[in-house]
Image (cartoon, grey):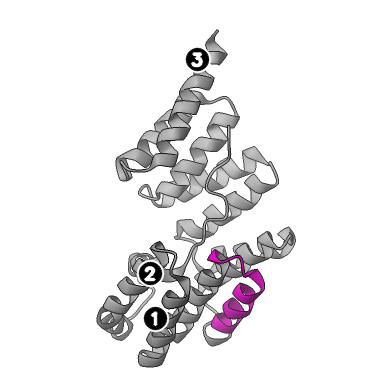
Amino acid sequence: MRGGRIFAVLACTAWLATAVAQDAIDDTSFNQMSKSSVLWKREHALEDADRFREAIAVCVQIGREYPTQNALAQSAIAGLNGRQGRYRDEIAWARRALAADPKLFQAEINLGTAQAQLGHPALAQAAYERALALAPTSPLPLYSLGALAEARHDVPAATAFYERSVALDPKFGSGWFNLAAMQAQAGRFDDALASLDKVLALDPTAEDAKAMRRHVEADKAAAAR
């Protein structure tokens, strides 16, 4: 059974939803986010299309036009560099974002992900733990810690982190996906299928979840022989 969605880039274009859920922004910041939402949507569309340089340009525009979102835009640029495999640039931009806003947990996640990709798991762990301390009600730090545990083949630890991430946010599809992968590796096939059903209920087009479900069903059938 292959692993889950390891080290998914947790770019801060998803920040608004998590921040509102945590009451992490005041009315002024929310109004500015509403006004800049068109630009964030454009950035997200460009990122989805792998048009990273253009997405970075939009982030620069956001930071220039909305100074209170500059740290957030810098963190997004960090994530976009990570999407291109430019991990040292990701670290530099994440540090710049944290210098502007030390409480920006998404920047800690980008920092940790880059360190993990560069082969520095202890530095990645520290960054993810700082992110968790900053945002204990977000599933993203727990998911990141799970991915790090999964990368070192610690299935029980990864499972526990993913379980905690989906307990915080039952609509967190990547958490369910990676949890399914760990459950399958542990031979918990029915649990894995149930987790994959959660993924597909959230996103019926998730081809990776459909493929994993077929593999889990085959492994379950083979184990029953």
Q: Are marks 2 and 1 in contact (CB under 8 Å)?
A: yes
Left or right placement of residue 68 versus residue 87 in this view: left
Give the labeled residue for mark 3. 221
The kind of residue on which mark 3 rests is Ala
Q: Residues within 10 Å of mark 1 (few under 14, many from 20)?
A: many
In the rendered image of this protein, does residue 31 appear above or below residue 124? Answer: below
Say which element carries label 3: helix
- Majority secondary structure in the magenta region: helix
| Crowd band around label 2 with a 10 angstrom C-alpha radius: few (<14), some (14–19), many (20+) | some
Type of amino acid at the residue the image marks with label 2 = Leu
Label for residue 46?
A: 2
**Amino acid type, residue under disc 1 in the picture:** Val
Of circles 2 and 3, the one toward us is 2
Q: Residue at x 34, y 39 (%)?
A: 200
Q: Residue at x 53, y 11 (%)?
A: 224
Quadrant where the C terminus sits is top right
Q: Earlier in the sequence, mark 2 or mark 3?
A: 2
Q: Nearer the viewer, mark 1 or mark 3?
A: 1
Regarding residue 20, the answer to whether it shows in the image is: yes
Q: Position of residue 145 (x, y in %)?
A: 60, 54
Q: According to the image, label 1 marks what residue?
A: 58
Question: Could you tell me how far apart the alpha carbons at marks 1 and 3 are, in whole angstroms?
Answer: 50 Å
Secondary structure beneath dot 1 equals: helix
User: Total marks drawn?
Assistant: 3
Confirm whether the magenta stretch covers residue 87.
yes
Which of the labelled discs sits on residue 37, or is there none? none
